[in-house]
Image (spheres, helix red, strand yellow):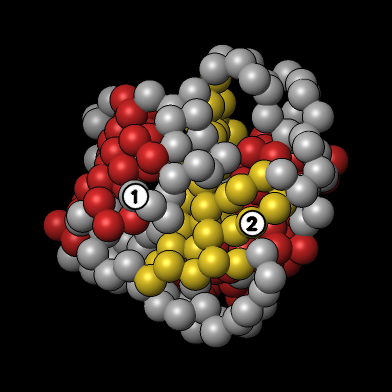
Amino acid sequence: MTNPTVGQNRLVIVGATGMVGGYALRYALDNSEVKSVTSIGRKKLGISHPKLKEVLHQNFADCSPLADALSNQDAVVYCLGTYTGSVSDEQLRVITVDYTTEFARVFRDSSPDATVSFLSGNGADPTGRSRLAFARYKGQAEKALLAAGFPRVYLFRPAYIYPVEPRKEPNFNYRLIRAIYPVFRVLFPNQVIRADDLARAMVDVVLRQTAERQVVVFENRDIRTMAESRTPPTNLAA
């Protein structure tokens, strides 16, 4: 594994107003290995930082206007998404699959040697056979990223993501799991991950990458290991 060049990494973060994306943004801005951060999203972040360039973009069905902002970047931490049940099935597919595919197209053309760190989900099924729409769509998004031809793609498949900071939960299931989280974490440790730990892992893995072409899938257990060691596994293999 190669050592990172301090202060030379140029990162893009998509979805920085979301829970995981927000932690990724803060961590990247505070990281001495990061030279610049380009945040791409629909809503203003409400913060300023010498490293930060904020790009507002409303229509992710067409990412062509982002070509200049995405040029000469080293990596993207892609956290754009939505919760099952918060939108229609068709909207879920568009946001999860179509937006990812379109972004990958433009980013690959603009920064062909860049690395991708993608927020997928537990049970993501690239075969498309899962009965769960979320799993099918995340699997399709993973396939689209691989088909785009990036030299390094890291797919993160967390299970339950613990919010850490209080928030309005998107539905009853999330409210329930948050309420029982202390017990759930003890009984099923490999089914939970803190949002901030997940975000740091997604950033760290693109900062300490190898020069080799590779695709690595990190299941929840792997992400927990990364969080506990605070460094990515050294056995990243294609």
**171 is higher (above) or lower (below) than 59:** below
Q: Which mark is residue 67?
A: 1
Q: Is residue 97 something that shows in the picture? A: no
Q: Earlier in the sequence, mark 2 or mark 1?
A: 2
**In which quadrant is the C terminus drawn?**
top right
Residue 130 horizontal side relative to residue 115, left or right: left
In the picture, measured across the screen, residue 121 lies left or right of residue 96, that is right
Whether residue 217 appears in this view of the structure is yes
Q: Determine the secondary structure under disc 2.
A: strand
Q: Tell me the residue at 31%/43% (across/down).
A: 106
The residue at 34%/55% (across/down) is 66
In this view, 160 is above or below 5: below
Q: Which residue type does callout 1 highlight?
A: Ala
Task: Check disc 1 and report its element: helix, strand or loop.
Answer: loop
Pointer 1 local density, CA inside 10 Å: few below 14, some 14–19, many at least 20: some
Identify which residue, 99 or 170, lies in the foreground.
99
Residue type at mark 2 is Ser
- Residue lying at the far right in this picture: please name it: 229
120 to 22, vertically: above or below: above
> Where does residue 203 sit, x and y in percent of width and height?
65, 48
Quadrant hosting residue 91: bottom left
Give me the residue at 71% from left, 51% from top.
34
Q: Which mark is residue 125?
A: none
Give percent across and percent down for residue 35.
70, 53
- Residue at 64% x, 38% y is 206
Image check: 167 left or right of 189?
left
**Seen in the image, is 55 located left or right of residue 46?**
left
Is 105 in front, or is 5? 5
Residue 57 lies, in percent from the top left, at 32, 67
